[in-house]
Image (cartoon, rainbow, N blue to C red):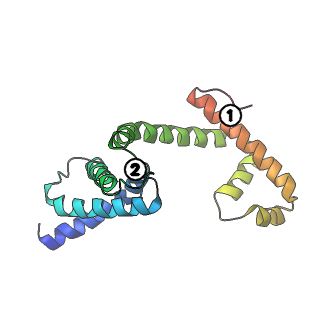
Amino acid sequence: MTRCHEKEEFARVFARVECKLRRYVQSMVPTASDADDVMQETAISLMRKFDQYDPDLPFFNWACRFAQFAAKKHHSRTLANRRQFSDAAIDAIADDYPRHQQLAVERRKALSDCIKHLSDADRRLVELRYFSDETVDTLSQRIEEPVARLYRSLSRIRKALANCVLKKMGTEEIV
């Protein structure tokens, strides 16, 4: 592969995981600007070492190791800042991250199942409010419901969905 094609391939592969990798990095550093710095260092390191990447393995997992190292390096450079996590904390977060990602996937699946069990009217309201850019005020005008009633309905639905998700996840109910 030519150097130009290698750079293009890196850009394609990196773009597919960048958002997920950023969330991973954000879990290890205290501020958004720290995450930007770590992401930049991670991307540079990944690009420099891309010729060593085995395409038969998941790129995200490979990139996470670079991000973890970059977070530690960033931490050691900024030790004077008291808001930094220790290396042990960064390692603990990195080790626990896959479990939290799996829980998030399970919660999204449970939420999707719970939404399917709502009444048609409640499901429509959820879709109108949360799957569009519509605000409560504009939605209130469009469906001709008072704002206060709409907020009460959404609160009731959110509580029902939360209880449903918790039940599907095998945890306690919200009262």
User: What amino acid is labelled 2 in the image?
Assistant: Tyr
Q: Position of residue 159 (x, y in %)?
A: 72, 39
- Residue at which label 1 appears: 163
Counting residues from the start of the chain, the first of labels 1 and 2 encountered is 2
- Which quadrant of the figure has residue 148? bottom right
On screen, 130 above or below 137?
above
164 or 50, nearer to the observer: 50
Q: How many marks?
A: 2
- Of marks 1 and 2, the one in the foreground: 2
Would you say 140 lies left or right of 170 here? right
**The C terminus lies in which quarter of the figure?**
top right
- Which quadrant of the figure has residue 93? top left
On screen, 92 above or below 66?
above
Residue at point 82%, 54% (across, down): 150
On screen, 149 above or below 108?
below
Q: Position of residue 65 (x, y in %)?
A: 27, 48
**The N terminus lies in which quarter of the figure?**
bottom left
Q: Residue furthest bottom?
A: 4
Residue at point 33%, 43% (across, down): 87
**Res 77 visible:** yes
**Res 13 visible:** no
**Circle 2 sits in a helix, a strand or a loop, which is it?**
helix
Would you say 3 lies left or right of 8 here? left
Q: Residue furthest front?
A: 80
Residue 39 bears which disc, if any? none
- Residue at which label 2 appears: 24
Q: Position of residue 92 (x, y in %)?
A: 37, 37
User: What amino acid is labelled 1 in the image?
Assistant: Asn
26 or 153, nearer to the observer: 26
Q: Residues within 10 Å of mark 1 (few under 14, many from 20)?
A: some
